[in-house]
Amino acid sequence: MKIALSYGMVSSMSRKGNCWDNVVAESFFGSLKTERVFFTNYTTQENARIDIVDYIEMFYNSNRRHSYLGYVSPKEFEKLWLLKKAA
C-alpha cells in the first residue's frame, strides 16, 4: 500500500472477504479453474496461455451457456440482442 502511494497510486480492492463486490470475475475465474486449469498439466507458460485463450474464446464466450444470460452463450446473446435492436 505504501509503495502504491509513493507513486501517486490509489489501490482499489473490494471489502475484505466480500466476494459479492466482484462476483462476475469470481464466477469467471471459478469456471476457468474448475472446467479447464485444474485438469491440465501445463509444461510451459506459453502452453498455458494458448490453452486459456482457447477456453475463453472458443468455449466460454462461444458455446458455454450462462444462467445470467438466460442460458444462452454470450455469442448467441449478442446475436439475439442485435436482431432485437434491428427490429
Image (cartoon, helix red, strand yellow):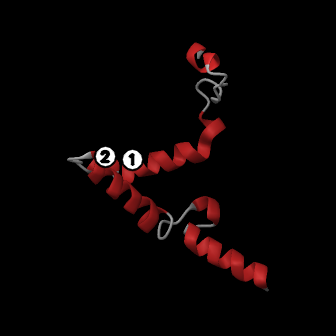
Q: Is residue 25 left or right of residue 80?
A: left
Asked if the residues shown at circle 1 and circle 2 are in contact, with their CB atoms under 8 angstroms apart, the answer is yes
Q: Quadrant of residue 21?
A: top right
Q: Residues within 10 Å of mark 2 (few under 14, many from 20)?
A: few
| Dot 1: element | helix
Q: Which residue is mark 2?
A: 38
Identify the residue at image location x=48%, y=65%.
64
Q: Quadrant of residue 22?
A: top right
Identify the residue at image location x=40%, y=58%.
53
Question: Which image quarter holds the N terminus?
Answer: top right
Q: Earlier in the sequence, mark 1 or mark 2?
A: 1
User: What is the x, y in percent for residue 83?
Assistant: 71, 82
Q: Is residue 35 left or right of residue 69?
A: left
Q: Residues within 10 Å of mark 1 (few under 14, many from 20)?
A: few
Residue type, mark 2 in image: Phe
Foreground residue among 48 and 28: 48
User: What is the x, y in percent for residue 26?
Assistant: 53, 42
Q: Which residue is mark 1?
A: 33
Q: Is residue 47 visible?
A: yes
